[in-house]
Amino acid sequence: MRNIRLSIFMITVVLICLGLVMVYSSSAIFAYETYGSAAYFLKRQLLYVLIGALLTVIVMSLNLAFIRRFSKVLFFSSIVLLILVYLPNLGREVGGARRWLKIGMLSFQPSELAKWATVLFLADILSKKQNQTTGAIRRFLFPLLSLMGVSALILAQPDLGSAVALAVVGMLMFFISGMPLLYIVSLGLSALPILYFFIFNVPYRRKRIFTFLNPWADIKGNGFQIVQSYLALGLGGLWGVGLGQSRQKLFYLPAAHTDFIFSILGEELGLIGTAGIVILFLLFLWQGIKISLRSTDGFIQLLSFGIVVAIILSACVHIAVVCGAVPTKGLPLPFISYGGSALILNMMAVGLLLNCARQRHFEERKL
């Protein structure tokens, strides 16, 4: 397991370092024009990396059984934080969405914490129910209601994409823990009318769907962002225009250092650079799944699986959005996009994954 831990650690470090380079490259001009310092976002990202590294070391050094004992406390605390975003003095509204808590100079997204708290909580409670002989409905009812409750609170912010992503990760964990496939398919089908309602009954979401189907119909309006993303990826070609030489970051592509950083990466580093990022995430998936498959402990199996799937799903959605494969959704690219809450908690999640790989409940077999 030592080689697996080392490879996951090195992949994460490489992704974070690439992220620092791309955050500076994609934000320097915007930061200088807005804040008077080209390194404004880079300095903040470096601070987030240092905080994340410190917390990651702490998570890695803690006993996994100790962390598991606090899974319920962490889960219900994250629910409280999701509710607090609606308080006038604590919650911060940006663009019509209340997704941030602001305490003094600090601001963070409780939904990011809720995602990882839910993965930890589900791993704990589902692993305890794996050997129970009671009916599937009784075994899975409480964790299912818990997952639905957290997803509903995130959806109410509103943040449909994050709510759906969490629900997908949760249902995959249910499947791994033994929930019959028929139940999962039934739940998915029953959720489709609800999903349809929340998409087509909300004007801005409905516009995103129509824009996704034909972004060129409104290239100066709703389709502007994705069209600029296409142009960035197209200009990059095979080798890219060169690091720091992007044109689309010159106030053409909105959110260039956050939701569309992969577009700038593709423009500056070309297909070679984007393929390299995809390969790194595939290696992360391969090595992370090894931990889950080799473990003989149900909790470690589910927890490591949930961590890896949540990170890879976020990466897939981000890349799919900037390539126009799915409707626009503001999910950051793990370890690369600018942002404190996501970066710090993703780093801590990797620390928890490495902690799982340190345990002794493993079978030595090659995969």
Image (cartoon, rainbow, N blue to C red):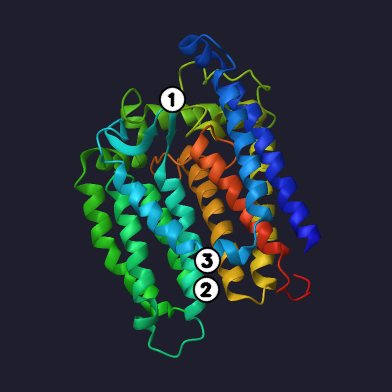
Whether 92 is drawn above or below 81: the answer is above
Marks 3 and 1, how far apart at CA: 43 Å
Tell me which label, 2 or 1, sits earlier in the chain. Answer: 2
Helix, strand or loop at label 3? It is helix
Q: How much space separates mark 2 and mark 3, taking CA atoms?
A: 22 Å
Cα gap from disc 2 to disc 1, whole angstroms: 39 Å
The residue labelled by disc 2 is 176
Marks 3, 1: nearer the viewer: 3
Q: Can you tell which of label 2 and label 3 is closer to the viewer?
A: 3
Tell me the residue that label 1 is attached to.
Answer: 254
Residue 331 x %, y %? 45, 42
| Label 1: element kind | loop
| Comes first in the chain, label 2 or label 3 | 3
Left or right for 282, reference 307:
right
In-front residue for pair 311/154: 154
- Amino acid at pointer 1: Pro
Circles 2 and 1 in contact, beta carbons < 8 Å: no
| Rendered residue at 40%/45% (across/down) | 110
Q: Quadrant of the N terminus?
A: bottom right
- Kindly identify which residue carries mark 3: 69
Residue 95 horizontal/vertical position (percent) = 30, 30
